[in-house]
Image (cartoon, grey):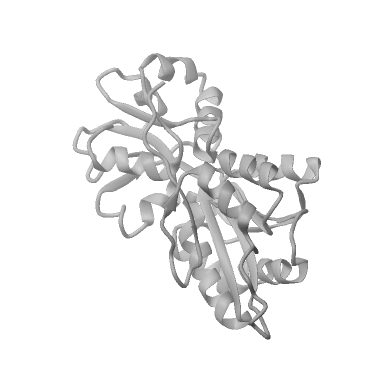
Amino acid sequence: MKRLHDTFCMFSPATERFAYRLPVVFLMLACAGCGDLSTLKHPQKEMLIYCGITMIQPVREIAQNFEKQNKCIVKIIKGGSGDLLKAIERSQKGDLYLPGEASYMDACISDGVCRSSVCVGYNRSVMVVRKGNPLNIPSELKSMTNRSYRVVIGDPDTGSIGKEAKSVLEKADLFNEVIANNPVFTTDSKDISKAIQNGHADLGINWYATTQWPENAPHIDALPIPEHYAPKTPLLLGLLGCSGDLNLAKEFMKNAISPEGKEIFNKFGFEPSF
């Protein structure tokens, strides 16, 4: 199985950190709070959010505003939704989890990983091609099986878009044919966009919101998928059972579903919740 490179990042929106691979993230989490705060009379509160890559831009902007309003530090780990869930289960540290596909949250609630969740918006999957569709690829899922096209899809085991792509293609009874077309597999939506932009692939399935990002919009076009194959999916922000500051985490959730929060998500291509 071919894969493209994937990284995970932890950062405060005010000052972005360097990229880390997952084992380093675990080490950082294990060491969280080890600093000497004895000299500080009023140490700032901190919270940690696990965020699927597709939603990182609106979450980062909301977090920047939240830090100023609440005089706190918000750290974010970004990555594929499946990998983030594994990180949560292993570290048992963190406050909020925002995967890119609702089934992750359903499992988290039933397993007790998350206490509750709120809907911050909706996303939907589309086929993606280079800007202007220079190969004139037909806007139909059957195109994913055409051996004339280099196809890229997400790995169903690591990220929400891979899970979504598999579901879409299975509904259309095309999954096995697409696999037979020897696609490139990636871990997340960001690498799907890169594969299209860099010419490593001609066609893929990705979240619609990614096609609206400033860095992608000049290079990528979306081809719609019929709604009975690809209905919009709710984005659920979950309150982790291991949260060290429930009040602060709940306040962030309120901000995310406020009119201002919905406007920010909408700005980055997500349909608002009502």
Above or below for 20 versus 258: above
Foreground residue among 212 and 157:
157
Task: Using residue 219 as the reference point, say whether residue 234 is left or right of it.
Answer: right
Foreground residue among 73 and 252:
73
Task: Using residue 13 as the reference point, say whether residue 107 is left or right of it.
Answer: right
Residue 154, given in percent of the width and then of the height, sits at 45, 33
Res. 144 in view: yes
Quadrant of the frame with the N terminus: top left
Above or below for 20 versus 86: below
Above or below for 206 versus 3: below
Quadrant of the frame with the C terminus: bottom right
Q: Residue at x 54, y 40 (%)?
A: 160
Instruction: Spot the residue most to the bottom.
Output: 41
Instruction: Spot the residue most to the left.
Output: 134
Q: Quadrant of residue 62?
A: bottom right
Above or below for 18 versus 5: below
Residue 230, given in percent of the width and then of the height, sits at 53, 37
Foreground residue among 20 and 123:
20
Res. 236 in view: no
Residue 76, given in percent of the width and then of the height, sits at 54, 59
Residue 207, given in percent of the width and then of the height, sits at 46, 45
Task: Using residue 3 as the reference point, say whether residue 122 is left or right of it.
Answer: right
Foreground residue among 119 and 104:
104
Q: Residue at x 40, y 45 (%)?
A: 190
Task: Using residue 118 as the reference point, say whether residue 58 is left or right of it.
Answer: left
Q: Residue at x 46, y 61 (%)?
A: 57
Number of labelled discs? 0
